[in-house]
Every structure is written in C-alpha cells, then in structure tokens.
C-alpha cells in the first residue's frame, strides 16, 4: 500500500510539473502575441479555475470591492467636489463643493503620476537644419504641478481635481498638501530626482485641504502664485486686444 501511495504521489508531481511547463509556454506565447492578453491570464496554472469562476478582470483586482466598514476605516472621500461652469470669466469649467467643508478638513485626495518634464516637450522637424527643434509643450503640462526650475512634475488624476481654478490670495479656499494616508509612499520624497524619475508611476498622494470654511456649492480655488497670476492677466489683456481688432475689421 505504501508503494502504491508513493507511486500516486510521484504521478501527481509529474502531472503538476507537466501542467506548469505547458502553462508557462502558453504565457510566453501570449506575451509575444498580445501583451494585454498576457496581462489577463493568471501567473500560475493553479489559479486558473478561480480566474474562470470570477472572471479574469475581477481576479486580477481582488481588492477592488471592499465592505462599507473597510471603506470607512481606510478609504478617502472623492465626492466632495463636482465639476460645473466656473464663476471666473473666460476660464471654462471649475470644481464645486457638494457639501459644507470645515477649515482644515480634506476636500479630496488624489494619486499623482511622476513625470519627466522633457516627456511633455513638442518637437518639430526644421527643414533648413534637418533636425528637430522644440516648438512648445503638451497641453497636459497645464494640469501638472512642480517647481519651474525642476524637471520633475506631478500629475494628479482623481475625479474633478484638474478643474480646480486659480483664485487670488483673498479668494482661494484650498491648498495642496502631501497626503497623510498610509498608501502615500512618503519615503519617495527622500530620494534623488533621478531616482524619482526612474519610478515614473503612482505612489504619491496629494490631499486637497480647505484653508477656510467652504459652503456647499462654493467653487474650490487654489492660489497658483503671483507669477502665474501675472501671466494670466497678460493673456486676458492680449486676448481682449485681439478680440477688439477682429471686431474692428468686421465692422470695416
């Protein structure tokens, strides 16, 4: 009987080894044909039955559904703001409070992607020189945060945060702080610029915090800084002058 059991165990081991090898081959072929297909497949053949039962999308993100109790203890509220037509002339849309928020409380939290500023450069081939020249920046730059002298940028991407407009020192009612959530990788802030660029992924979090009491329906505003404010005023004045010139031509 012991010999029979040993033979059965050895047979099972050979079967598992063969299945693992075949599945590994399948994964390699999927990777070569379609990387998205490979990402949808479990890493281990033993997980295939569970993936088939749950669905590959759900299996790859098992923690995507959480209980109300878990969310209350660990989650961040993202529905304190909603987009709408801004109160600022010529500024398009803005972000507005969906409920009253006390000074010092978090309005919302957003993950940020670290970017290299050079990735947002726009290049155009100069025929006379036979090489490419820098002609501008991608629009995404308008929604990134960073020091003007730094090559490192942070792009927040939570709902509605990129609709928060500029307000003067007197009008602004919110500011950005590094998040206090445990998911915020604060240790990244101690690495060098080159090390941070090498990550180029999410891991850092911003908290948008109320700097005074905010009423329900009030627009959320940052103070972008005096330099930005001066450039915006210059843009508005130039736009106004161009509009007047067009109107004069039409009248003529």
Image (cartoon, rainbow, N blue to C red):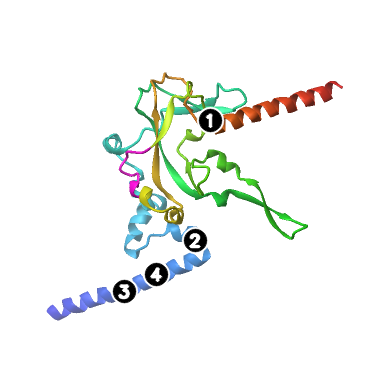
Mark 2 vs mark 3, CA separation in Å: 25 Å
Disc 4: which residue:
24
* 247 left or right, relative to 159: right
Mark 4 residue element: helix
User: Is tag 2's residue or tag 3's residue first in the polypeptide sequence?
Assistant: 3
In the rendered structure, the answer to whether residue 241 lies left or right of residue 47 reads: right
Picture coordinates of residue 81 (x, y %)? 44, 28
In the rendered image, residue 72, in percent from the top left (x then y), is placed at: 29, 34
| First-in-chain label (1 vs 3) | 3
**Are dots 3 and 4 in contact, CB under 8 Å?**
no
**Tag on residue 226?**
1
Q: Residue at x 30, y 71 (%)?
A: 16
Mark 3 lies on residue: 17
Q: Earlier in the sequence, mark 3 or mark 4?
A: 3
**Disc 1 from disc 2: Cα separation:** 47 Å
The residue that disc 2 covers is 35
- Of the numbered discs 1 and 4, the one sitting upstream in the chain is 4
Gap in Å between the C-alphas at discs 1 and 3?
66 Å
Is 61 situated above or below 166?
A: below
**Is 129 rendered above or below residue 224?**
below
Q: Position of residue 70 (x, y in %)?
A: 27, 38
- How packed is label 2: few (under 14 Cα within 10 Å), some, or many (20 or more)? few
Quarter in which the N terminus is drawn: bottom left
**Magenta-colored span:** 178-187
Secondary structure under tag 1 reads: helix
- SS at badge 3: helix
Q: Which mark is residue 246?
A: none
- Neighbor class of circle 4 (other Cα within 10 Å; few <14, some 14-19, many 20+) is some
| SS under mark 2 | helix
């Amino acid at each position: 009987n012991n010999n029979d059991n040993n033979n059965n165990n050895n047979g099972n081991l050979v079967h598992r080894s063969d299945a693992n090898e075949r599945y590994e081959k399948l994964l390699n072929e999927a990777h070569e044909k379609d990387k998205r297909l490979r990402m949808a497949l479990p890493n281990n053949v033993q997980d295939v039955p569970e993936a088939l039962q749950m669905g590959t999308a759900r299996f790859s993100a098992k923690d995507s559904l959480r209980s109300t109790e878990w969310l209350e203890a660990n989650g961040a509220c993202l529905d304190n703001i909603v987009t709408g037509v801004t109160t600022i002339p010529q500024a398009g849309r803005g972000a507005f409070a969906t409920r009253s928020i006390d000074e010092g409380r978090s309005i919302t939290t957003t993950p940020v992607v670290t970017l290299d500023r050079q990735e947002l450069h726009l290049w155009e081939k100069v025929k006379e020189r036979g090489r490419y020249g820098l002609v501008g920046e991608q629009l995404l730059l308008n929604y990134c945060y960073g020091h003007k002298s730094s090559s490192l940028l942070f792009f927040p991407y939570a709902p509605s945060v990129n609709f928060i407009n500029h307000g003067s020192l007197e009008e602004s009612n919110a500011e950005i702080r590094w998040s206090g959530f445990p998911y915020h990788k604060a240790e990244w802030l101690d690495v060098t610029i080159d090390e941070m660029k090498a990550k180029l992924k999410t891991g850092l979090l911003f908290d948008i915090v109320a700097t005074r009491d905010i009423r329900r329906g009030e627009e959320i505003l940052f103070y972008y800084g005096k330099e930005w404010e001066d450039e915006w005023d210059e843009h508005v004045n130039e736009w106004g002058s161009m509009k007047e010139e067009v109107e004069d031509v039409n009248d003529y």
